[in-house]
Image (spheres, coloured by chain):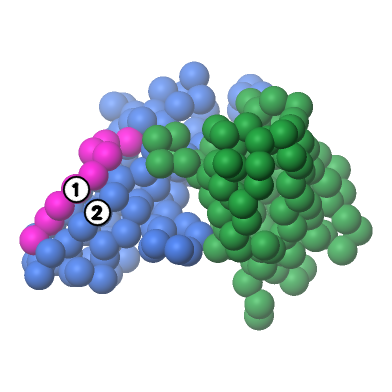
Amino acid sequence: KAGVTQTPRYLIKTRGQQVTLSCSPISGHRSVSWYQQTPGQGLQFLFEYFSETQRNKGNFPGRFSGRQFSNSRSEMNVSTLELGDSALYLCASSLAGTRFGNTIYFGEGSWLTVV
Amino acid sequence: QQQVKQSPQSLIVQKGGISIINCAYENTAFDYFPWYQQFPGKGPALLIAIRPDVSEKKEGRFTISFNKSAKQFSLHIMDSQPGDSATYFCAASPARGSPYNTDKLIFGTGTRLQVFP
């Protein structure tokens, strides 16, 4: 069974640009959540989608958005990039979501560098 | 309060030694406590998890100790090996039916473990 697939793995963007990251969950998983990982802040929750609906949202500005498609694939978008957005963006999938003890499976992440 | 506080930030252990990572939480509505292991260039992967109805869970060389009254839990790695060198994250998830207004998994800030031969 294929794992969580994230594309692209590495990208460099300029301040002010926008970026779209893609995530394909494990087959059969309906929940996709996104996390931002930085050395000092650890794993910060961005949002979670379940069956195309955003179910949870973290404390990030509105420049961060996401969506989920009917095939459970998800995208996240960051507009008007800032230097501080440089991070590893991790996607995780699970059968029923991050709630109540469900196991979540992470992809290898997309490394975003903003210059 | 939604925080999970993890310490130490980094840990250096000799091969064969015991690695101990501690986490503390404030919200009593949490009832699921997983630990994730992350190797460089990889995403985190579930290592071991515990619920508060038990005080200890052991899987091979990895043990979670849980102290409900102190709201603390820790990961012990016995006979630490160079292959255990990774970043470890503790996490917490709220209980079903809790008044907590969110049900996302909340992570600690991570501990970078280095095991030297």
Which chain is mark 1 on? B
Mark carried by residue A98: none
Q: Is residue B83 above or below residue A43?
A: below
Mark carried by residue B113: 2
Does B11 lie within the magenta span? yes
Residue A20: where, in percent of width, then height?
Answer: 76, 50
Relative horizontal placement of residue B68, taking residue A57 as reference (left or right): left
Q: Amino acid at mark 1?
A: Leu
- Dot 2 lies on which element? strand
Does B19 lie within the magenta span? no
Query: In which image quadrant can residue B67 be found?
Result: top left
The color chain A is rendered in: green
Tell me which residue sits at (26%, 65%) in the image: B84
Q: Residues within 10 Å of mark 2 (few under 14, many from 20)?
A: many
Visible residue check, residue A55 = no
- CA separation, marks 1 and 2? 5 Å
Q: Residues within 10 Å of mark 1 (few under 14, many from 20)?
A: some
Question: How many marks on residues?
Answer: 2
Tell me if label 1 and label 2 are in contact, CB under 8 Å. yes
- Which of marks 2 and 1 precedes in the sequence? 1
Query: In which image quadrant can residue A23 be found?
Result: bottom right
Tell me which residue sits at (35%, 51%) in the image: B88
Which chain is mark 2 on? B
Q: Amino acid at mark 2?
A: Leu
In the rendered structure, which segment of residues is drawn in magenta? B6-14
Classify the position of the C terminus of chain A by image quarter: top right
**Predominant SS along the magenta part:** strand
Q: What chain is colored blue?
A: B
Mark carried by residue B11: 1
Relative horizontal placement of residue B27, taking residue B105 as reference (left or right): left
